[in-house]
Image: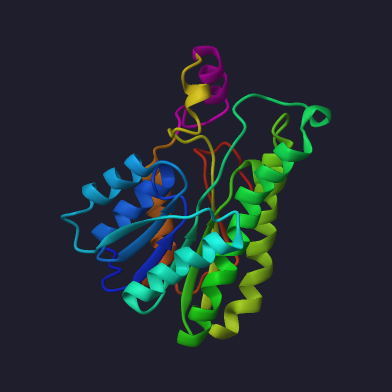
Amino acid sequence: MKISLENQVAVVTGGSRGIGAATVKLFAEAGCHVVFSYLQAAAAAKEVVDTCCNASGSVMAVQADVSKMSGARKLIDKAVGRFGRLDILVANAGIWNAEPVRIDKITEREWDKMVDVNLKGVYTAIRSAVPHMISQNRGRIIAVSSTAGQRGEAFHSHYGAAKGGVISLVKGLAPELAPHNILVNAVAPGWVVTDMAEPVLRKPAEKRKATSLIPLRRFGRPEEVAMPILFLASEMSTYMTGEIININGGNVLCG
C-alpha cells in the first residue's frame, strides 16, 4: 500500500540537507505541499526544490531561524499564507558539536546555541503551528530527537540534554493535544550518513568504532529515517501518539 499525503500541507524545519531534505522529497512524492526552512544553505535549499519539481506535491523553501520565535512564525505564516492550512509539522532542524568537549569546557554561548536550535527550535515551531491545527481539529507533529536523547552522550552532553528535552516535550504534548485530534510523536535516529556526521565518517578509526557498536554494522541513510516520519504523518498511524520510534540499527534498544 502506497502512502499518500495528497493535498496536505507540511512544514519541515531544517529541510535543506540530511534527514530534513530526504523528508521533504518523500513528502512531495506522496503528494504533499511542503514548505521547509533553511538557515544559511541557500544553494542546497534550491537544489532540494529543483529535485522536487516533478513531484506531485509542491515545495517551497523559506529562510528562517527557528531558534527564534520570529523565525518560526515567519515559516508557519508563509505556509498557511500560501496553502491556507497546516496539517503536518516535522521539527527537524538541529546541530551537533563535531569535536568532543568536556562539560567544564562547554561555554555558556555553546550551551545556549545547542539548546536554542535543538530544543527551543522544536518549541517555537510547535508553538507557531498548534493554533492552526487546533482550529482544524487535526494535526500531526513529528519531532526529530536522537539516541543521545535516550542514553546521553559523553563529551556531547549539551546535545544529549537538548535531544532528551525533545522526548520529554513530545511525551507532555501528546495527552495535552490529543483532545484536538493532534498526534505528537518523535523519531530517534542513531548514526546517519549526513553532513552532521561527516566529521566522524571521514576518520576511519572513529567510523569503525561507531560502526562496531551498531548491530547492523553500518550507518543509516537519511531516507531510512524519512520513511518512518512519512508513516507518522500518514493515515497508517492514526492510533499513535506520544511514541518514540528508534531508528538506529539496533544501537540503542529502548522504548
- Residue 147 appears in the figure: yes
Q: Nearer the viewer, residue 167 or 46?
A: 46
- Residue 236 appears in the figure: no
The quadrant holding residue 241 is: bottom right
Q: In the displayed image of the protein, which residue is found farthest to the left?
A: 54
Residue 135 relative to residue 122: left or right: left
The quadrant holding residue 157 is: top right
Residue 105 relative to residue 85: left or right: right
Q: Is residue 74 above or below residue 18?
A: below
Q: Is residue 209 above or below residue 170?
A: above
Q: Is residue 215 part of the magenta span, yes or no?
A: yes
Quarter of the rendering occupied by the N terminus: bottom left
Q: Is residue 1 above or below residue 161?
A: below
Q: Nearer the viewer, residue 219 or 92?
A: 92
Question: Percent from the top left, x then y, of residue 82?
Answer: 33, 73
Colour convention: rainbow
The quadrant holding residue 232 is: bottom left
Q: Is residue 236 above or below residue 67?
A: below
The structure residue drawn at horizontal position 59% and vertical position 85%, both measured from the top left corner, is 179
Residue 116 relative to residue 197: left or right: right
Question: Percent from the top left, x then y, of residue 220?
Answer: 43, 36
The structure residue drawn at horizontal position 34% and vertical position 41%, both measured from the top left corner, is 44
Q: In the displayed image of the protein, which residue is found farthest to the right?
A: 104
Question: Percent from the top left, x then y, of residue 42?
Answer: 37, 44
The structure residue drawn at horizontal position 51% and vertical position 20%, both measured from the top left corner, is 207
Q: Which residues are magenta?
A: 204-219
The structure residue drawn at horizontal position 65% and vertical position 76%, both measured from the top left corner, is 175
